[in-house]
């Protein structure tokens, strides 16, 4: 990966802007277009900013969303290729840089597919329409007698055929067709969508080709590290800078004042050297006197004690108050009380945070190469931090070695920008693994104190959840407020809130200086575990089958009143369907399990996706867990774009969900993370993965949605409920390694 590769992409955009028919993505993803005249070159036809067709018939497509391993660099171009009627072997993909012509370019919340799916169909269909019109004019025949297929237009009555390459000169001169002239394909005729297509970068990945942000190389580049106070919110007072500057390979070392924004440019010490290893070696010799600030008093033990005290008091915020929960609990045939706890955890992406920056004082431009999930936010943070116009900040989107929400934050980008402005050369900032683990924007920990009751028939009649979460103090509109961390704020509409006549949801926020950010399926990843584990407790208290108990709880309405997750309505019918299907596919209730074996079920609505899962486990008498099978049924709409990628996402979500259930936790002592690297922060190993993962997609008449996040949340409760079925032991604290599963 080098400068010429980026230059070729910029050249493509300059060429398109020079005179072709340009179709781009307007505000909100709405298709916008303008006719700009003749083709830009004699050899290419660029009907829009996403498509270039050469005289050789090869189609180059721009992938505008960041690729973080979710497969979007392959699947979205597939949508264009389907409508364009081009064979996939004749398609080439390039990554688009940050560009307003592309519309939104973030990758988070499983939004890339639903945000772009319909517009990308129209982009491909519009280009196909122009090519068909060019062929009809060349033959002087009606458009209705022409059809496109396999990269060519055929005149049906005569059998004449012209390849797209031959149509390039004529097509480039045509105006944009009227909307009514552009007909989308009937989904029944799709030949590409729904098939298995390997990732466009797969060959480069398995052969070790440079693809990722950490691989970026520029002529004359220097290398940097950035040391921050180990205590959250601290800042440097002084450092042995002269000694560091005297070390071999070190070009400079200096203090960066930073800002008060925990998720922005935090104060620190930068070291710039002629190699990464020289910078790392100097970092180990760095001695800094820190002002640790208020965060030095933080500890997980103290937070847990505060949460226990909060459990006996009213919540700071009442999120939902329906009916009379106290009376319903008093009149219940059986009641259950339980507390569930989960820790702060890291994203632990395989590629540590990094960014390459090149500040050019002659014209005041800053060029960035960043493996980011949110390039627009990165540009905006750099702009606001340094008072630099956005148009002076050029950002190249580089493939990320994992994201999971971490690279929605832009702290590593603004750090590189700060260093670059003091260095007269391109500079690559690389975090150490310890930086990545201890200075993450963490998934917030939490505590849930629950009470529930069932009547004599085993029907759920009361639900009370007091959620104790974490929040940072921020300034907003001139006021100082507590802002819960991403995924650390419970919605009053969260299941099963709107389904019960007697429900009380309340929240208490513990103030902290710990930076928090979105972690895969924010909120849902822990709420699903808490709610469906406790629902399972109540089902067993009522002597009910867990599947039937959940179906009864869902009820028979199609849409539950109120607003669902992310502003989406909650379709009870869709959730009932996936729950019934997973019971059928798993053989729920039909198997005889020996002691130490069992099955558990859970479902969750997350990021527009409806997912139900059944886990089957074996627990040895000594407490060793084996996940034997996970059955997944998901409804993500009318079309699976790339079956190979979709299956990969489901398998990855199951494995990631199991890993997060079993091992990772971060302990906070003295305002700092205790764990430093993977020897202390365990993740799943191959022998621990499920023996079998069965995947079933329900195809429904609903808009197409994303798949990177919805499958993860139900995994943990399904496994924990299966553990109870196998051993009679409830898991109420994460990670699972803290619970003794042995039985006799």
Image (cartoon, rainbow, N blue to C red):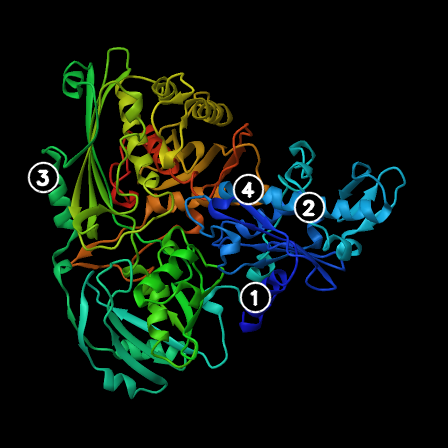
Image disc number at residue 10: 1
Indicate which disc, 4 or 2, sits on the residue closer to the N terminus: 2
Task: Specify few, some or many for label 4: CA neighbours under 10 Å numbering under 14, 14-19, or 20 or more.
Answer: many
Q: Decide: is 200 above or below 532.
A: below
CA–CA distance in space, label 3 to label 4: 49 Å
CB under 8 Å between discs 1 and 3: no
Label 3's element?
Answer: helix
Indicate which disc, 3 or 4, sits on the residue closer to the N terminus: 4
CA–CA distance in space, label 2 to label 3: 62 Å
Q: Decide: is 221 above or below 650.
A: below
Task: Specify few, some or many for label 2: CA neighbours under 10 Å numbering under 14, 14-19, or 20 or more.
Answer: many
Lateral position of residue 262 relative to residue 409, left or right:
left
Residue 68 percent location from the top left of the image: 47, 54
Q: Residue furthest right?
A: 158
Quarter assignment of residue 567: top left
Label 4's element?
Answer: helix
CA–CA distance in space, label 1 to label 3: 58 Å
Q: Which residue is mark 4?
A: 117
Indicate which disc, 1 or 3, sits on the residue closer to the N terminus: 1
Q: Which residue is mark 2?
A: 84
Q: Which residue is at a point 51% across and 48% down the rendered structure image?
A: 26
Q: Which residue is mark 3?
A: 309
Task: Specify few, some or many for label 1: CA neighbours under 10 Å numbering under 14, 14-19, or 20 or more.
Answer: some
Q: Which residue is at a point 76% across and 60% down the rendered structure image?
A: 55
The image quadrant where one finds the C terminus is top left
Lateral position of residue 610 relative to residue 240, left or right:
right
């Amino acid at each position: 990966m080098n400068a010429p590769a980026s230059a070729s992409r910029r050249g493509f955009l300059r060429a398109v802007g020079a005179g072709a028919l340009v179709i781009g993505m307007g505000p909100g993803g709405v298709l916008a277009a303008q006719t700009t005249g003749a083709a830009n070159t004699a050899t290419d036809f660029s009907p829009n900013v996403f498509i270039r067709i050469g005289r050789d018939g090869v189609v180059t497509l721009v992938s505008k969303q960041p690729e973080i391993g979710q497969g979007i660099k392959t699947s979205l171009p597939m949508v264009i290729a389907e409508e364009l009627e081009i064979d996939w072997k004749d398609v080439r993909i390039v990554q688009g840089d940050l560009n307003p012509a592309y519309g939104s370019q973030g990758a988070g919340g499983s939004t890339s597919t639903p945000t772009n799916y319909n517009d990308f169909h129209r982009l491909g269909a519009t280009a196909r329409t122009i090519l068909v019109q060019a062929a009809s004019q060349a033959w002087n025949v009606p458009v209705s007698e022409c059809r496109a297929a396999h990269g060519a237009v055929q005149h049906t009555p005569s059998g004449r055929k012209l390849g797209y390459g031959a149509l390039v000169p004529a097509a480039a001169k045509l105006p944009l067709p009227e909307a009514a002239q552009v007909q989308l394909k009937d989904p029944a005729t799709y030949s590409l969508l729904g098939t298995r297509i390997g990732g466009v970068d797969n060959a480069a990945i398995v052969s070790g080709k440079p693809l990722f942000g950490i691989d970026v190389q520029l002529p004359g580049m220097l290398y940097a590290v950035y040391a921050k106070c180990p205590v959250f919110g601290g800042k440097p007072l002084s450092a042995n800078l002269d000694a560091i500057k005297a070390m071999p390979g070190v070009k400079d070392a200096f203090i960066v004042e930073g800002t008060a924004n925990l998720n922005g440019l935090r104060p620190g010490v930068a070291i710039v050297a002629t190699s990464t290893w020289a910078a790392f070696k100097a970092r180990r010799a760095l001695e800094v006197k820190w002002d640790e600030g208020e965060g030095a008093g933080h500890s997980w033990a103290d937070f847990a004690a505060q949460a226990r005290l909060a459990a006996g008091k009213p919540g700071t915020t009442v999120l939902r108050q329906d009916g009379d929960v106290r009376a319903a609990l008093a009149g219940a045939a059986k009641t259950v009380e339980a507390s569930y706890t989960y820790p702060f955890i890291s994203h632990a992406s395989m590629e540590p945070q990094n960014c390459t920056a090149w500040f050019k004082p002659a014209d005041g431009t800053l060029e960035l190469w960043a493996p980011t999930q949110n390039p627009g936010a990165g540009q905006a943070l750099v702009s606001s931090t340094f008072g630099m116009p956005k148009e002076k900040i050029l950002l190249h989107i580089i493939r990320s070695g994992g994201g999971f929400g971490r690279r929605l934050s832009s702290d590593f980008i603004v750090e590189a920008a700060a260093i670059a402005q003091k260095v007269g050369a391109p500079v690559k900032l690389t975090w150490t693994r310890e930086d990545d683990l201890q200075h993450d924007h963490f998934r917030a920990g939490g505590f849930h104190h629950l009470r529930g009751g069932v009547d004599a028939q085993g029907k759920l009649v009361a639900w009370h959840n007091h959620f104790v979460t974490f929040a940072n103090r921020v300034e907003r509109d001139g006021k100082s407020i507590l802002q819960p961390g991403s995924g650390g704020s419970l919605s009053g509409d969260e299941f099963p809130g709107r389904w019960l006549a007697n429900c009380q949801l309340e929240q208490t926020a513990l103030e902290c200086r710990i930076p928090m950010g979105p972690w895969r399926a924010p909120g849902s990843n822990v709420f699903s575990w808490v709610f469906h584990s406790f629902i399972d407790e109540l089902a067993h208290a009522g002597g009910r089958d867990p599947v039937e108990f959940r179906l009864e709880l869902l009820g028979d309405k199609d849409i539950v009143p109120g607003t669902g997750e992310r502003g989406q309505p909650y379709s009870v019918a869709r959730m009932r369907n996936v729950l019934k299907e997973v019971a059928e596919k798993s053989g729920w209730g039909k198997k005889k399990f020996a002691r130490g074996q069992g099955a558990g079920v859970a479902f969750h609505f997350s990021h527009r996706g409806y997912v139900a899962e059944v886990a089957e486990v074996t627990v040895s008498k000594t407490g060793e867990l084996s996940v034997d099978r996970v059955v997944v049924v998901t409804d993500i709409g009318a079309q699976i774009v790339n079956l190979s990628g979709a299956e990969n996402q489901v398998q990855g979500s199951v494995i990631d969900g199991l890993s997060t259930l079993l091992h990772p936790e971060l302990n906070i002592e003295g305002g700092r993370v205790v764990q430093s690297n993977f020897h202390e922060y365990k993740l799943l190993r191959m022998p621990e993965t499920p023996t079998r993962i069965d995947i079933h997609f329900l195809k429904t008449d609903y808009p197409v949605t994303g798949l990177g996040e919805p499958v993860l949340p139900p995994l943990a409760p399904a496994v924990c409920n299966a553990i109870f079925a196998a051993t009679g032991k409830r898991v109420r604290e994460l990670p699972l390694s803290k619970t003794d599963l042995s039985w006799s």
